[in-house]
Amino acid sequence: MTGRTIDVIEAGLVPYGEALEWQRSLAQARLEHRLQHDVLLLLEHPPVVTLGRTSHAAHLLRPDGLEVFEVERGGDVTFHGPGQLVGYPILDLTGYRPDLHWYLRTVEQALIEALAELGIPATRRQGYTGVWTSDGERKLASIGVHVKQWVTWHGFALNVSTDLSHFERIVPCGIPGVVMTSVEREGGKGVGEGSLWDHTIAAVLGGFGRAFGAELRPALAVTAR
């Protein structure tokens, strides 16, 4: 093993604004070496739209009734809501590889491996960040990150059982004509007992452990030293 440890917090349903401040606080603590290990936050959000640094107003079609946040992550507009597994890795890339492109491809690889465990062949699509069905026709996961002094925050959103109709209110990721899909819609399933949600979390944790060469361990809470 590499000796890398990632503390995993499964936080449940968390309002977006609260989660944003939480990950910023954790990232700052990691920057200042007050946080001993990297952290992966896994959660869901109430319905919300976020706008990345390269977003265009024209891609926000019908935001009525939804909270909208402008944030520092890369990428365009996306939707978060219940049934979507959102992951915020707070990683110090100096302990891995200080290379943003490597990081994005590694997050994609972690999700591709997770989806394979759920019986869904998935792939990258040339020219885009994210994870797609193997034919490149439907998008399963969006990725948008921010890095400061090689510490990451923001992350990925994997549609598990999301109400996909909400994506009709935006141009997802600024890609005209993109078709969003979910683990549920693609027939994903785990092995043994448990819900699709639980199987998806287990698969994602396994994928992250392998892709980043780290031990992932459950943590009820993480505090800075």
Image (cartoon, grey):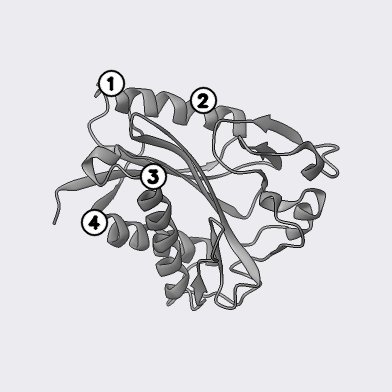
Which mark, residue 100?
3
Dot 2 and dot 1 residues touching (CB under 8 Å): no
Q: Residues within 10 Å of mark 4 (few under 14, many from 20)?
A: some
Give the amino acid at mark 4: Gly
- For marks 3 and 4, give the one nearer the viewer: 3
Q: Nearer the viewer, residue 88 or 150?
A: 150
Query: Image check: 90 left or right of 212?
Result: right
- For marks 4 and 2, give the one nearer the viewer: 4
- Give the CA separation, mark 3 to mark 4: 17 Å
- Helix, strand or loop at label 1? It is loop
- Give the CA separation, mark 2 to mark 1: 17 Å
Q: Earlier in the sequence, mark 2 or mark 3?
A: 2
Q: Earlier in the sequence, mark 4 or mark 2?
A: 2
Provide residue 11's location: percent of width, then percent of height: 48, 41
Q: Quadrant of residue 220?
A: top left
Residue annotated with mark 2: 21
- Give the CA separation, mark 4 to mark 1: 24 Å
Residue annotated with mark 4: 213
Give the amino acid at mark 1: Glu
Residue annotated with mark 1: 32
Q: Earlier in the sequence, mark 4 or mark 1?
A: 1
Q: Residues within 10 Å of mark 3 (few under 14, many from 20)?
A: some
Query: Image check: 27 left or right of 19?
Result: left
